[in-house]
Each structure stands twice: as C-alpha cells, then as structure tokens.
Image (cartoon, rainbow, N blue to C red):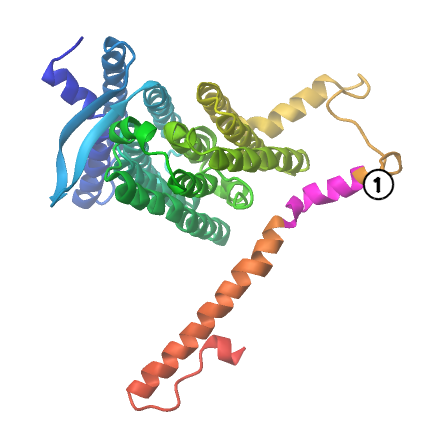
C-alpha cells in the first residue's frame, strides 16, 4: 500500500493542472495582445499530460488499496461552526474509470484542435474554455462530496454554454447557447435542493459519510425526495425527455467541442451523477422506477427522431440521447457496473463519430460512387408512401415533429412564464413610478404590443 505524501499530493492535483493552464493562457492574453498559437498549445498539452499522470497515479493508489474506495481528505476550504467544506477526493471504480476517459479524450481534443482551429479568431478562447472544462469535469468526477460535485457541475455547465455559442457573431449559436443555459439553470435546482436536503438529513454531503450511514438512515420519504432531485439534474445535463431538445441545437459549435462535450463527456455527466448516487438510489425503488421510465421513453423517442434527421450531427446527437437513455434504464434496473461499461464504450465511440462528422458527406459520396451500377444498396432504399401503413405514417410524422414535446413546453410553460414575467415587470415599473411621484410610468414593449 502506497503511503508517500508526495504521491498522494500529485494524485490530488488532477483537477488543478488544467485550472493552472487556463490561468496561464489568460495571463498571456493580458500580457500580450495575441499569444502565439504554439504557446497556447504547449501550455494546454503539458498541463493535460500532467493531468493524465495525476489521474493514472490516483488509479494506481486505488488499486494498491485492494480496489476499495479511497477517501482522500486534503484540507478545509471553508469552516463555520460544525459545518466544513473539505477538499477531498473519492477514488473508486466509477471515478477512476470516468476520470481516465476524460483525461484521455481532452488531451486528444487539444491535439485535434491545434490544426482544426488554426488561425481561428477564437483559438485562444477555445483552449482556455477547454482547460476550464477539464478542471470542472475532473472536480465533478473525483470530488469526494456533493458540494464539490456541484462546483464541478456548474463549471462544466458554464463552459458548455460558452462553447455552444462559440461563434458568437452568428445568431443561431447564441440562441442555442441561451436554450442550453435556461435548461441547465432550471434542472440544476434539483442537484442544489438534493445537496441541501442531504445536509439537513445526514449533516454531510461527503460520499464516504453518506454511504456509511445509509443502512441505518433509510426511513421516510427523504431518499425518494433526494433521488428525484438528482434525477431532474441528470435529465438536464444528459438531455433526457422532456428537456433534451437543446442537444441537437448545440451542434453549431466547433467540431472539437461537439466531440468532447456532447459526444464524449458533458452529456454523460448526468449518468455519472446517478452512478455516483447508486447506493442512495438503491434505497429508493420509486426514484429508480422514475429513472427507468425516463430513460426508456427517451431511448425510444430519440431513436425514432434520429432516423428522420436531415444532417449528420443531429442524427448522431439523437443517437447519443438514445444511448444515454439506455444507461438510465440500466441504472434504474440497479446495474451500475453495466451502465459504467456502457458509458465508457459509448464515450469513446461518440467522440470518434463527432470528430468524423465533417467528413461524413465525403464518405457517403465515395460509397455511392463505389456502388455505382450495383443496384439498390441495403442502406439506401426508396420507400413508396402507398406501401406504408397508416400507423407507420403516423409514427413518421411524430418522429419528424419530435413528438411535439417542444411545442407543448413552449405553449404550456415558456409562454405563461414569459407572460408572468412581463406582468411582474409592468407592476414593478408602476410601483417605481408611484414611489418616485410619477403617476404615468413609461409603457414597456409588452404594453405597446
């Protein structure tokens, strides 16, 4: 068993290396008007290599402890009374595997983006955001408490939003980024409420403490309440029904960010949250049933919608949503190791597919030329409308309309909330005008309409 403090410290620096790289790139940008691309890439790759080394060191430490969970306590970030926010890492099978996959994929992305984004105006911004994302995802995965997981969760969310809107001169990516932001903000309330509930229930959010006290503290509806809150947060991050419409719209960013964020890592963080919370969900059959139902419905609907998608990235996005839904099903069936294996394999596959999507059209044309004169192919067939049943046509219409979920959300949730916000704005303007002695407040755009 390895006990060297130096080795433990190096293993604990996994989330710290990319954060330091992002700070260095920011400092270079302040000192120089435009740092050279070679400098930015060198900083990114060296810090990511150190990150991979720290993650692998943590894996070796976990193996040296007989593959038993390792709760590594470092120091207190904040302390008030009997509450302390500790910087602590939790190394077990799930965190070691996902952290290793994340470190490898982000390192590969830094290499790919070196040429893909060459001379792009946002080159340095991309690398700074990528390193910030790396720090967030490793804090999320390796953090030893829900408090640290929430901190990493927020960093991952904000960097994802900024990279969706990377091409900020175009209105499409900006609208998509706002949609992602609103979805994340609403669903993240579930994780925040669950963390607060754990503090009140078990007086701790540390995984080691929670898992140790769960067998004696599973009475009442608290596990169900916390499990549903975690499910809401996971649904938003992993694009599950009914809030998954943001993912196909997030494809206008750079291919490199689509691959590592929405193909390999970010979209799987909801699955990781449920995997991390598997011991808690095991004591709440109702919450597990909800996870299973949400995942199954999402898998079917996304698979059908992907079949009628008109572009390669959207098709891959819906395929990703469908596979993540199957991971929810596996967790709902209390098969966390199968879900972990599925997550790992799917992350690698989707990462490669997203990197290859710019070449998909060229590949399709080459296949078509190669099959010229060979008759109908098995993959491309003409289907006459008259040969399909009424149910097939009905199903096709539902799939091409994305099952009208977004239209229903817009009509029954978004519009009433916007109307209420405009009404509150008018009341606020009237109150301010009355307090200032002006009885005729200026009409806002809502009144003019």
Q: Give the x, y percent position of residue 14.
A: 23, 25
Q: Give the x, y percent position of residue 125.
A: 32, 41
Q: Give the x, y percent position of residue 428.
A: 37, 77
Query: Against 182, is 339 above or below?
Result: above
Q: Is residue 41 magenta?
A: no
Q: Which residue is mark 1?
A: 390
- Badge 1 density bin: few <14, some 14–19, many ≥20, Cα 10 Å: few
Q: Give the x, y percent position of residue 221.
A: 41, 42
Query: Which residue occupies the foreground of this view, 391 or 113?
Result: 391
Q: Residue at x 49, y 42 (%)?
A: 250
Q: Residue at x 51, y 51 (%)?
A: 172
Quarter the N terminus occupies: top left
Could you say whether the residue bearing mark 1 is in a helix, strand or loop?
helix
In the image, taking residue 226 as reference, residue 69 lies left or right, namely left
Task: Provide the major secondary structure of the magenta segment.
Answer: helix
Query: Magenta segment, which residues?
Result: 392-404
Query: Which residue occupies the foreground of this view, 102 or 90?
Result: 90
- Within the image, what quadrant is residue 201 found in? top left
- Within the image, what quadrant is residue 314 found in? top right
In the image, taking residue 156 as reference, residue 353 lies left or right, namely right
Tally the numbered discs. Answer: 1
Q: Residue at x 45, y 47 (%)?
A: 180
Q: Residue at x 54, y 63 (%)?
A: 415
Quarter the C terminus occupies: bottom right
Residue 121, visible in the rendered structure: no
Query: Against 343, is 310 above or below?
Result: below
Q: Is residue 393 magenta?
A: yes
- Within the image, what quadrant is residue 241 found in? top right
Query: Against 19, is 402 above or below?
Result: below
Residue 388, visible in the rendered structure: yes
């Amino acid at each position: 068993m390895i006990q060297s403090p130096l080795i433990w410290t190096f293993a604990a620096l996994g989330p710290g290396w990319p954060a330091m790289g992002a700070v260095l790139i920011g400092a270079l940008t302040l000192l120089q008007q435009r740092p050279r691309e070679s400098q930015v890439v060198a900083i990114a790759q060296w810090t990511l290599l150190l990150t991979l080394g720290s993650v692998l060191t943590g894996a070796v430490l976990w193996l040296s402890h007989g593959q038993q969970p390792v709760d590594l306590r470092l120091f207190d970030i904040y302390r008030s009374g009997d509450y302390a926010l500790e910087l602590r890492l939790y190394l077990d099978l799930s965190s070691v595997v996902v952290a290793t996959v994340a470190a490898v994929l982000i390192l590969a992305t830094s290499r790919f983006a070196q040429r893909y984004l060459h001379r792009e105006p946002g080159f340095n911004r991309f690398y700074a955001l990528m390193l910030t994302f790396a720090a967030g995802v490793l804090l999320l995965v390796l953090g030893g408490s829900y408090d640290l997981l929430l901190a990493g969760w927020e960093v991952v969310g904000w960097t994802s939003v900024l990279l969706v809107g990377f091409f900020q001169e175009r209105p499409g990516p900006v609208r998509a980024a706002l949609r992602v932001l609103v979805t994340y903000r609403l669903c993240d309330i579930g994780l925040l409420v669950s963390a607060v509930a754990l503090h009140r229930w078990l007086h701790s959010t540390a995984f080691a403490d929670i898992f140790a006290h769960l067998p004696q503290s599973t009475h009442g509806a608290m596990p169900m309440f916390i499990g549903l809150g975690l499910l809401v947060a996971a649904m938003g991050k992993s694009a599950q029904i009914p809030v998954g419409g943001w993912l196909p719209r997030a494809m206008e960013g750079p291919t490199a960010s689509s691959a590592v964020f929405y193909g390999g890592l970010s979209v799987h963080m909801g699955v990781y949250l449920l995997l991390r919370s598997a011991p808690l969900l095991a004591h709440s059959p109702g919450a597990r049933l909800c996870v299973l139902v949400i995942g199954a419905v999402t898998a079917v609907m996304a698979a059908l919608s992907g079949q009628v998608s008109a572009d390669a990235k959207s098709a891959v996005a819906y395929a990703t949503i469908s596979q993540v839904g199957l991971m929810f099903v596996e967790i709902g069936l209390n098969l966390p190791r199968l879900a972990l294996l599925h997550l790992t394999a799917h992350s690698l596959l989707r990462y490669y597919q997203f990197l290859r999507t710019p070449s998909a059209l060229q590949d399709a044309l080459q296949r078509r030329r190669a099959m010229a004169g060979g008759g109908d192919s098995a993959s491309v067939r003409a289907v006459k409308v008259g040969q399909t049943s009424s149910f097939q046509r009905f199903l096709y219409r539902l799939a091409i309309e994305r099952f009208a979920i977004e239209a229903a959300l817009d009509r029954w949730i978004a519009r009433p909330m916007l109307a209420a916000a405009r009404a509150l704005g008018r009341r606020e303007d009237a109150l301010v005008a009355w307090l200032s002695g002006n009885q005729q407040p200026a009409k806002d755009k809502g009144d003019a309409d």
